[in-house]
C-alpha cells in the first residue's frame, strides 16, 4: 500500500506505514473527498489526529495549511512511523507525537482543537 500526501506544501511526499498486522489507511479517494468538504476550515487550524497510524490525515491537514497537529496513537510502531513521516514532510515544528491510548489522551487533555480526525482500527473498538 502506497501512502502519499495529495495536496499542498508536501504534495506527493511518500509516507511510510507502520509495520502492524492488519494496518490499513484511509483510501486516497476518501481522504481527498473529506478534505474537499472541510475546505477552507483547514487553514490556520489546530488539529488532533487520534489513532493516527501513519499520520496520514494530520499530515495532509498540515500540508494544506493547518497551523498545528497533535498525533496520538497507542502503538509504538505507529508513533515511530508518524515521527518519521512528520520529519520527512518538514512538519516537525508544527506537530507533536504522543504515544498514548487515544481515549485516555482525550480524557486528560484540556487543549481545544478546531478539527479532530479519528480513524481507529476496527479491532481496537470491537474489543472494548
Image (cartoon, grey):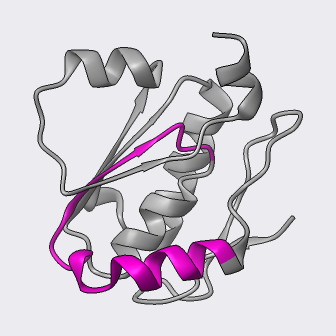
Q: Is residue 101 left or right of residue 95?
A: right
Where 107 sits versus 14, above or below? Answer: above
Q: Which residues are magenta?
A: 30-53
Q: Is residue 89 left or right of residue 14?
A: left
User: Outermost residue toward the top?
Assistant: 128
Residue 91 pos. (x, y %):
36, 65
Q: Is residue 15 visible?
A: yes
Q: Determine if the magenta segment contains residue 40.
A: yes
Q: Determine if the magenta segment contains residue 49.
A: yes
Q: Is residue 53 left or right of residue 121?
A: left
- Identify the image quadrant of the N terminus: bottom right
**21 or 13: nearer the eye?**
21
Q: Is residue 90 visible?
A: no
- Identify the image quadrant of the C terminus: top right
Where 87 sits versus 110, above or below? Answer: below
Residue 21 pos. (x, y %):
89, 33
Task: Tell me what residue is drawn at x 54 percent, y 37 percent.
Answer: 51
Residue 65 pos. (x, y %):
27, 80
**30 or 99: nearer the eye?**
30
Task: Tell me what residue is drawn at x 18 percent, y 49 percent.
Answer: 113
- Number of numbered callouts drawn: 0
Which corner quadrant of the image does residue 127 belong to?
top right
Amino acid at each position: 500500500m502506497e501512502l502519499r500526501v495529495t495536496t499542498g506544501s508536501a504534495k506527493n511526499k511518500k509516507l511510510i506505514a507502520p509495520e502492524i498486522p492488519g494496518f490499513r489507511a484511509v483510501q486516497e479517494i476518501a481522504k481527498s473527498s473529506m478534505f474537499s468538504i472541510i475546505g477552507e476550515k483547514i487553514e490556520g487550524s489546530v488539529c488532533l489526529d487520534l489513532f493516527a497510524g501513519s499520520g496520514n490525515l494530520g499530515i495532509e491537514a498540515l500540508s494544506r495549511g493547518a497551523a498545528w497537529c497533535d498525533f496520538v496513537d497507542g502503538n509504538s510502531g505507529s508513533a515511530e512511523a508518524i515521527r518519521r513521516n512528520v520529519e520527512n514532510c518538514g512538519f516537525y515544528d508544527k506537530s507533536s507525537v504522543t504515544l498514548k491510548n487515544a481515549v485516555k489522551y482525550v480524557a486528560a487533555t484540556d487543549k481545544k482543537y478546531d478539527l479532530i480526525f479519528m480513524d481507529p482500527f476496527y479491532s481496537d473498538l470491537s474489543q472494548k
